[in-house]
Amino acid sequence: MNATKTLVQKTIEAPEDGFNVREFRQDFPILQRKVYGKPLVYLDNAASTQKPRVVTESMCRFCEQDYANIHRGVHHLSQIVTDAYEAARDKVRDLLNAADRREIVFVRGATEAINLVSSSYGRKNIKEGDEILVSEMEHHANIVPWQMLCEETGARLRVAPINDDGEIILDELAALLNDKTKLVAVSHVSNALGTINPVKQIITLAHERKIPVLVDGAQATPHMSVDVQDLGCEFYVFSGHKMYGPTGIGALYAKLDVLETMPPYQGGGDMIYSVTFEKTIYNDLPYRFEAGTPNITGGIGLGTAIDYLKSIGFDRIEAYEQDLLVYGTRRLSEVPGLRIIGTAKEKAGVLSFVFDDIHPHDIGTILDREGVAIRTGHHCAQPVMKRFDVPATARASLSFYNTKEDIDALVDALHKVIEVFR
Amino acid sequence: MSDLREIYQQVVLDHNKSPRNFREIEKPDRRADGYNPLCGDQLTVYLLLNGDTIEDVSFVGKGCAICTASASIMTQALKGKSESEAEKLFQRFHYMLTDEGEDPGAQDDNPPLGKLKVFSGVREFPVRVKCATLPWHTFHAALHQADKPTTTE
């Protein structure tokens, strides 16, 4: 084993900028495993990312050595755990550069965060005849909660179109903003196309009309540094599992003055200050929005994942992934019959593609047998599929632990697909 | 590649490339829509009956190779069958891929599976079983005049 390891380290030099991907790959035990006897090439990172050992170990250590409930007991363990969980909140605050830790609400993930905003802020502020504006590239999670709210209130969902490259047409978005628009909900990075949206510009446009903005950051936080104060958005949501943390934990950022006006989302323990049968007084922020025992273990894991990403550095991650994206785009473009869907100028590491005469599902099955894991289907963005007139796409999505060899393996496997269907 | 050849047999690839009975029936006695939200497979099955006999059966839609070939071969297998034979064939095909229910023709291979056996390898690819069975479920819904679109979920 040691001899092999030395050999690998000798033959593969670290890139000049010092981003030693081999070293980071060692942090992810799963990347050593095989699938159907072939080394795993994991290119489904937009669906969920793998977990570095530090994350799983932190959760394991917590469960084995420090476990108790939070915000309750006077006993030693409860205090330790409360501190650890609240420290994770501080890490999320730092990740997003939020001004105040009370602006960070732990939730199950981006989906729950959007549902929280829709149920609480939406029901209070959006009425019949009002409009909610989304983009044509949204994930279902940033469409359906608003549709449900529209159905309930009689408000209207409007859609800002995208161009053939998969970019929001800003002029058209601006033209859709009007006095009836009560919220703009838009993704930071598209999961199906990889487009990085000009969210700051969109927020500025909306704010000129005093319209609040929710940014779905599920596909942004794994790849780039985010500064909610710089963006100025009212809401920002993300999921832990897409950024190397566990499933079942994520966060809602909401500006304090907005959060203060919002009614509770769910009732229960922890979200109250005092309860009598006559009257319940709600807890302070952000606990007012965190009913019931939360995903404590998940919160701790997410905190560790944030530490891990910061130790690598978002600037370096972004630069490395961009390099990989350029390489992947070039290599895929060379595959005969392959068409890339989503060719925005500003893109994160997503390569969605189709063949004219081979269905994505067939591509996925053949790639799978080659050990290459990609996603095929509509990626929970059926309107995007409709926009590009395809039933589905195949999608390879990148992480900083992927290599050019992974891209090569994808391309080789695609040639096998062509061979089968020739 | 060998196990892939098991699922993507030449017959399957051929029917995918040139699906048989890939057309609408102008005045069908029955029709049903089928949809697999997981992968976007979507098809419509048309039936023309003559008394108890399936006089014509056809389909249109968009799907993966397994779904398209399965629909194509299904139409060939069903044409001329009585409703009860077709029902049995549906159950036999379903059993071959899922082990669910029972095989009403296990003893005497009747009605014969014939060319439908090319799909037996699909059972080794659990996520693809629905691709092969969607056309059959859709046909089944058409036969029984189900109002709702068939989905695999």
Image (tube, coloured by chain):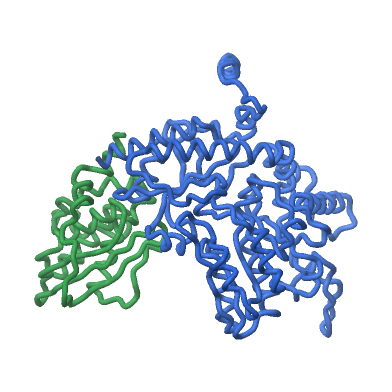
**Of A309 and A176, which appears nearest the observer?**
A176
| Picture quadrant of residue A54 | top right
Q: Report x, y in % for residue A27.
A: 64, 33
- The chain coloured green carries which letter? B
Q: Report x, y in % for residue A312.
A: 70, 36
- From the image, which quarter does the C terminus of chain A lie in? top left
A218 vs A65, left or right, is left
**Which residue is pictured at 79% across the width and 75% down the height?**
A261
Q: Report x, y in % for residue A374.
A: 46, 44
| Picture quadrant of residue B79 | bottom left
In this rendering, the answer to whether A142 lies above or below A28 is below
Specify whether residue B99 is in view: no
A201 vs A382, left or right, is right
Specify whether residue A87 is in view: yes
Count the marks.
0
Q: Report x, y in % for residue B31.
A: 23, 73
**Of A170 and A79, which appears nearest the observer?**
A170
- From the image, which quarter does the N terminus of chain A lie in? top right
Name the tint of chain A in the rendering: blue
**Which residue is pictured at 85% across the width and 68% down the height?**
A284
Q: Kindly give the residue lying farthest to the front in the view shown.
A: A171
**Which residue is pictured at 82% across the width and 66% down the height?**
A285
**Of A325 and A125, which appears nearest the observer?**
A325
In this rendering, the answer to whether A19 lies above or below A352 is above
